[in-house]
Image (cartoon, helix red, strand yellow):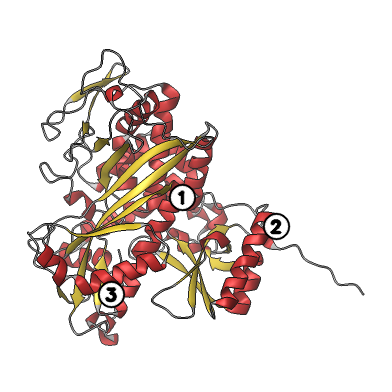
Amino acid sequence: MTGVVSTPFAARCGVHDAAREQAVQQTVQRIRDNGIDLVRFVWCDAHGALRGKALTAAAATKAMLDGVGMVGTLMLKDTSDRTVYKVFDPNSMTQLPRFAGAPNLMLLPDPHTFRTLPWAPGTAWVFCQPWYQDGTPVELDSRFLLQRALGRLADRGLGMVCGLEVEFHIYRIKGGWQGPDLDAEQAAWPGLPPEVSLIHPGYNMLSDGCLDLSEEPLRIVQRTAEGLGLPLTSLEVELGPSQVEAVFGATDALSAADNMVRFRNGVRQALRRAGYHATFMCRPSFDHIMSSGWHLHQSVVSLATGQNEFMRQQAAPDTSVGDARSTLSDTGAAWLAGLLAHAQGMAALCTTTVNGYARLAPNALAPHAAVWGRDNRGAMLRVIGAVGDAATRIENRLGEPAANPYLYMASQVWAGLDGLNRGLVPPLAAASPYAEAAEAVDNGVARSNALPNNLPAALDALVADAVMQQGLGAGGMALYTRIKQSEIRRHAEAADVRDFERREYFSRC
């Protein structure tokens, strides 16, 4: 009797072609050549954290074509790792019927994302995306949402380029890497945060002395980033105690989002092994601390020529220095206007935690209103460049470093495309970005340009934004708001807010 040869799952999903087959074979060869005996098949959850399974080399080779199963409830977790839907009650799963009963999803790897781990000998990562077992993509997945947004941008012949500036905190764990958070007698859900001390005293920005004090952990960060192939350009001492910043060169948007996930998860693991704790929580719950931001530099390029489509060859006629078209092309100005028009709606996708809104205060080098400025760090959107400058770009300063990078970047594409599609024109640059939020008129309706100052308000603005709704899709909006409402509710009910934030954000973000 002749055996039946089954079709690989990747082929049933319609993604396995000759190019992917070649990439799979190259990855299999790298596993052999580098002595890799465990491959972590990982997926980025709604909060930017990696989850997955470690497969032996032989199993990993097979799973490159057939994928690996993952319980679907991992997509339904809030920041405490609690499932926010009653998956065994069919009546509660009307919004997400394909998740009823906690069925398996299939994680299918992208072989181009394979990386050996510089801190874990014999171990590698490969990024995966979830698929339903019938071979259709899980439309709720954040990486899929960014890919779909970039696909719509590509329909206009454009691609997005992003550069990352990421502020975060590094602490020394008291008692070494096996701190009190690993005490079995004190296990909890979420668990204890580690007890820590500073790596530098702060309040001496770019101090060479503080840089020297931070040499050991920053060297670990450098080796980790470079070992993962990330385009790291600098490591800097920020203003706050134990606060540092990493700056990365520009790449295409999907690679930039993948790199943010690699960086955040990689440095946390590598530093922990050396007795340090890295946190991308916006504002750690200690006295005399400084908030961290994630500044996203962005431009769009022609897919045909690679030319920066934000660059203007000469200033538009009859424009003043405060007019966006004195620096940005018409494409760049419309993109800028789109970002401003949807600033409130995108806030919950850029600053994603209750804790993150402590940063958005006047005169704090963080945005307070949806305004733009020419090289002005007080504005939400900082326009950088000049006529004829190929590096002309827009820096969005709204994000926090704990944000899901795929959703953060997708929100920029949705907003920017709306600006292009409607031919929006931005207002003049703000001369005083921290002045009281002004009233603007949009299609005859007065609206404030003040940014949401808390997560509940940001979530309301997200739900009210038709462009963000369309980008996320009905299921994506339902899931994201449900997850965030759980976080908001538990934060409001916490007897000790500082303890809540240390367990939920400091330990896990």
Comparing marks 1 and 2, which lies closer to the viewer? 1
Q: CA distance from mark 3 to mark 1?
A: 33 Å
Q: Amino acid at mark 2?
A: Ala
* Nearest to N terminus: mark 1 or mark 2: 2
Asked whether, in this view, residue 232 is left or right of residue 206, the answer is right
* Nearest to N terminus: mark 3 or mark 1: 3
The reply to whether dot 3 and dot 1 touch (C-beta < 8 Å) is: no
The residue at 41%/53% (across/down) is 257
Q: CA distance from mark 1 to mark 2?
A: 23 Å
Q: Amino acid at mark 3?
A: Gly
- Give how far across and how far down residue 423 sits, in percent: 40, 21
In the image, residue 464 above or below residue 100: above
Q: 28 or 334: nearer the eye?
A: 28
The residue labelled by disc 3 is 191
The residue labelled by disc 2 is 11
- Give how far across and how far down residue 249 sits, in percent: 35, 51
* Nearest to N terminus: mark 3 or mark 2: 2
* Structural crowding at the residue carrying mark 2, measured as other residues with C-alpha within 10 Å and reported as few (<14), some (14–19) or many (≥20): few
Comparing marks 3 and 2, which lies closer to the viewer? 2
Q: Amino acid at mark 1?
A: Leu
SS assignment at label 3? loop
Q: CA distance from mark 3 to mark 2?
A: 42 Å
* Structural crowding at the residue carrying mark 3, measured as other residues with C-alpha within 10 Å and reported as few (<14), some (14–19) or many (≥20): some
The reply to whether dot 3 and dot 2 touch (C-beta < 8 Å) is: no
Q: Quadrant of the N terminus?
A: bottom right
The residue at 30%/63% (across/down) is 509
- Quadrant for residue 175, please give it: bottom left
The residue at 81%/67% (across/down) is 5
The mark found on residue 254 in the picture is 1
Residue 427 visible, this angle: yes
- Quadrant for residue 304, please give it: top right
